[in-house]
Image (cartoon, rainbow, N blue to C red):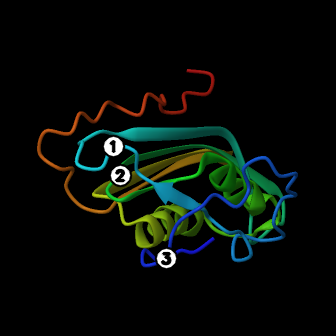
Amino acid sequence: MSNSHDAPLAPKFLGQNTGLPASPDEAVLDYVPNPRVGSLYLTRFAAPEFTSLCPVTGQPDFAHIVIDYAPDQTIVESKSLKLFLGSFRNHAGFHEDVTVGIGQRLFDEMRPKWLRIGGYWYPRGGIPIDVFWQSGAAPEGLWVPEQGVASYRGRG
């Protein structure tokens, strides 16, 4: 696998038994050629059971993560993304750092036309925290539906 766009891209994990990486830094994201180069479209990944650790208490934090991107030359291979997201289970980080870090890493490595991430974190200390990041304005003409995750309501 190569994150460089100068080398041929081939999925490393497809068809392989692969364990979770020990940390997000050790996780390898695979990218494959976009089968629709030149087409403007949106790809969405949703991870409704995302988990990381609170850096203060060490207790698990839970979120519904939604990643939208408009591919350019490459797309992220879904199994490698699943393993990358799973690697956060033992990673301690604040909601903002985790959410923005995922979005920035994908954007920096994949180089899509556009990317946004929504982290809808379940309450900690009675306060839900939602974190949003995007690479810039969406390309003109791109259909960008709402992420569809309702704000936390509790007993309302």
Residue 2 appears left or right of 6 = right
Which percent across, then down, holds residue 91?
76, 68
Vertical comparison of 127 with 143: above or below: below
Q: Which residue position is annotated with label 3?
A: 7
CA distance for labels 3 and 1: 19 Å
Q: Residue 71 carries which label?
A: 2
CA neighbours of label 2 inside 10 A, class few (<14), some (14 to 19), many (20+): many
Going from the N terminus, do you reach mark 3 or mark 1 first?
3
Foreground: 100 or 110? 110
Foreground: 46 or 61? 46
CA distance for labels 1 and 2: 9 Å
Q: Give the residue type at disc 1.
A: Arg
Going from the N terminus, do you reach mark 2 or mark 3 first?
3
Q: Residue 36 carries which label?
A: 1
Find numbered disc 1 in the image and state the secondary structure of the residue it sits on.
loop
Which percent across, then down, holds residue 21?
81, 66
Tell me if label 3 and label 1 are in contact, CB under 8 Å: no
Q: Give the residue type at disc 2.
A: Pro
Tell me if label 1 and label 2 are in contact, CB under 8 Å: yes
Q: Give the residue type at disc 3.
A: Ala
In this orientation, does residue 53 appear?
Answer: no
In this orientation, does residue 84 appear?
Answer: yes
